[in-house]
């Protein structure tokens, strides 16, 4: 919803960044049971997104700081 560069909050359930005003509009609406219990945290606590592996088309979940490269589980198991 909001620009990640300007957002201060992140909803782990929606996987979206929010400014405080937008988050309150959506998550503060207690009449909508769908949003009750969503885990809204400081934007700095949002999970890192390394994209998809170009070879295996799986989510990259591992990052190697020495090679500055992200890897999917298949790459890790196969020793890529």
Image: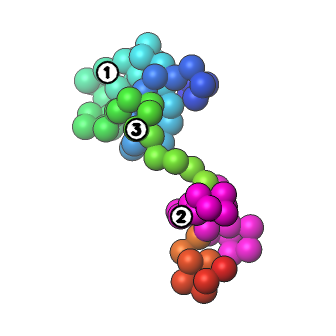
Question: Which callout, 1 or 2, points at the residue further toward the start of the chain?
Answer: 1
Q: Mark 2 — residue?
A: 62
Q: Nearer the viewer, residue 80 or 16?
A: 80
Which part of the image, by quadrant, shows the N terminus?
A: top right
Helix or strand or loop: what does disc 1 sit on? Answer: loop
Q: Mark 3 — residue?
A: 45
The answer to whether residue 60 of the structure is visible from this angle is no
Neighbours of disc 1 within 10 Å: few (<14), some (14-19), many (20+): few
In contact (CB < 8 Å): disc 1 and disc 2:
no
Residue 41 percent location from the top left of the image: 35, 33
In contact (CB < 8 Å): disc 2 and disc 3:
no
Helix or strand or loop: what does disc 2 sit on? Answer: strand
Please tell me whether residue 29 is drawn above or below residue 43 in the rendered image: above
Q: Quadrant of residue 32?
A: top left
Residue 40 percent location from the top left of the image: 34, 33
User: Please, which residue is most extreme toward the right here?
Assistant: 54
Instruction: Look at 58% across and 29% down and name the residue there.
Output: 4
Residue 12 percent location from the top left of the image: 40, 42
Q: Nearer the viewer, residue 1 or 78?
A: 78
Residue range highlighted in magenta = 51-71
Which part of the image, by quadrant, shows the C terminus?
A: bottom right
């Amino acid at each position: 919803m909001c620009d990640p560069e300007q957002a201060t909050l992140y909803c782990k359930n929606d996987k979206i960044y929010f400014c405080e005003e937008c988050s309150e509009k959506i998550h503060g609406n207690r009449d909508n049971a769908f949003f009750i219990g969503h885990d809204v945290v400081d934007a700095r606590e949002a999970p890192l997104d390394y994209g998809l592996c170009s070879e295996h088309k799986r989510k990259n979940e591992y990052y190697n700081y020495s090679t500055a490269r992200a890897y999917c589980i298949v790459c890790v198991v196969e020793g890529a």
